[in-house]
């Protein structure tokens, strides 16, 4: 999940709602999509801006750990795949920024909020990609976890978000397959390569589980988001689904999930597993993960270093418009 | 200078013979950059054979608050639908 800590208020009871709010909730309950210019509660708008904004920032910051390996990919084919994937993430960020902008916030405001730390991105991207196997682990686990959340969000109540999600899911699912393919090659390679694959799984397992956000016991704030259908499943439901899907894939690769307590539970037809270290999660969200400062610095630097170029293009476009206008007057 | 680039709406013809369909929006300084960016963002996988871009501010839209008077009068009129006609009455 790319939006981990988007809190909303408690669910409003029908008798506390205004007539407009009741009509709005009724539309959502009927499965209608809400479109940009239509009436919506202020809190719905604000929550969506935070959620879609976090999601967009995650796509953009998420390019950094993978971009780290483009120049060092072990073959031309792997390099081309990785380049195309990082390009896709940029595209996903853009779809999502546009969806957020339909809610009345500007792109510059969103970027400024990321750079000042007022808006977050997913905690997962604050972990380093130390070896080539990490690129496989990111595709397999991180994209796998993202898909768990994004597939149901295709049905969310806000039209532009839902449509962005549909486009993104198409591309994300084969990113995950590419990651798994990379892990398969490593796991079936030399003993050193297999050890690298195991090491990558060891380091990315718990951070991937954290992507779904805090446990439902802690996350009392999501009820309103679920009533509004901008969150479809609870954090723990998605985490369970992810574990159930991923553990057999790890077994197939001959890798060991780094969890002593992992065991199949016949009764619930799912795995029992250890929760991640939530203190670490909150530390990473607060800004004290292994790479938080690097990531934000890289984004701010890219923005500032590109300023002269953006300004240049604006100036060129303005002059072209002025020349055109002058030529038109002269012709008349 | 920090003025944000204008917003453009992007329409793509998916295949020959189909309509252009709205796929999303993007920021660009002018029309030619909007077309180039649209190609990069929305047609990375051969999703289109033609692109239109239009300044978002130039688009005139119907107002959602007037949806009732706008569209409801069409509801009771069954005769524009192909199912209105009686199959039995068709010349054989």
Image: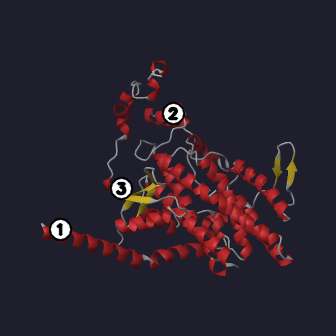
Label annotation for residue A26? 2
Label annotation for residue A275? none
Question: Which quarter of the rendered picture does the N terminus of chain B lie within?
Answer: bottom left
Relative to residue A169, is residue A325 drawn left or right? left
Residue A34 appears at what percent x and percent y?
48, 43
Q: Residue furthest bottom?
A: A72
Q: What distance separates the C-alpha of mark 2 from that of mark 1?
A: 54 Å
Q: What distance separates the C-alpha of mark 1 from that of mark 3?
A: 24 Å
The residue that disc 3 covers is B56
Q: Picture quarter containing residue A200? A: bottom right
Relative to residue A276, is residue A12 drawn left or right? left
The residue that disc 1 covers is A328
Q: Chain of mark 3?
A: B
10 Å neighbourhood of mark 2: few (<14), some, or many (≥20)? few
Residue B29 appears at what percent x and percent y?
36, 68
Residue B22 appears at what percent x and percent y?
44, 52
Q: Residue at x 57, y 64 (%)?
A: A59
Say yes or no: labels 1 and 3 on the same chain: no
Element marked by disc 1: helix
């Amino acid at each position: 999940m790319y939006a981990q800590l988007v809190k909303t208020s408690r669910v409003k009871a029908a008798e506390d709602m205004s007539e407009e709010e009741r009509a709005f909730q009724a539309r959502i309950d009927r499965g209608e999509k809400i479109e940009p210019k239509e009436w919506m509660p202020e809190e719905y708008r604000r929550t969506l801006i935070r959620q879609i904004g976090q999601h967009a920032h995650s796509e953009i910051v998420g390019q950094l750990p993978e971009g780290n390996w483009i120049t060092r990919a072990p073959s031309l084919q792997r390099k081309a795949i990785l380049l195309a994937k990082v390009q896709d993430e940029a595209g996903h960020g853009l779809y999502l920024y546009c969806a957020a902008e339909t809610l009345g916030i500007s792109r510059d405001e969103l970027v400024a909020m990321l750079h000042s730390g007022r808006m977050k991105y997913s905690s997962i991207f604050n972990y380093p990609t130390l070896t080539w196997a990490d690129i496989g682990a990111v595709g397999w686990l991180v994209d796998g976890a993202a898909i768990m959340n994004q597939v149901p969000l295709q049905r969310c109540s806000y039209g532009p978000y839902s449509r962005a999600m549909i486009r993104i899911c198409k591309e994300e699912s084969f990113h995950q397959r590419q990651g798994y393919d990379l892990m398969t090659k490593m796991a079936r390679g030399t003993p050193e390569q297999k050890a690298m694959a195991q090491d990558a799984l060891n380091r990315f397992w718990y951070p991937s589980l954290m992507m779904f956000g805090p446990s439902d016991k802690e996350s009392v704030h999501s009820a309103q988001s679920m009533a509004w259908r901008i969150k479809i499943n609870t954090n723990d439901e998605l985490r369970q689904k992810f574990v159930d899907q991923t553990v057999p894939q790890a077994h197939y690769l001959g890798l060991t999930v780094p969890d002593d307590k992992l065991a199949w539970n016949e009764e619930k037809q799912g795995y029992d597993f250890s929760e991640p270290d939530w203190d670490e999660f909150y530390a990473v969200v607060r800004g004290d993960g292994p790479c938080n400062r690097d990531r934000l610095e890289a984004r701010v630097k890219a923005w500032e270093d590109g300023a002269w170029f953006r300004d240049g293009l604006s100036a060129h476009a303005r002059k072209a418009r002025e020349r055109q206008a002058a030529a038109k007057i002269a012709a008349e | 200078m920090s003025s944000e680039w204008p917003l453009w709406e992007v329409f793509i013809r998916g295949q020959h013979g189909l309509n252009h369909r709205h796929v999303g929006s993007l920021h660009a300084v002018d029309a030619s950059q909007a077309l180039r960016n649209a190609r990069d963002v929305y047609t990375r996988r051969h999703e289109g054979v033609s692109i239109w871009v239009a300044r978002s501010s130039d688009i005139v839209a119907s107002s959602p608050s007037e949806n009732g008077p706008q569209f409801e009068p069409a509801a009771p009129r069954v005769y524009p639908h192909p199912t209105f006609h009686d199959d039995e009455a068709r010349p054989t």
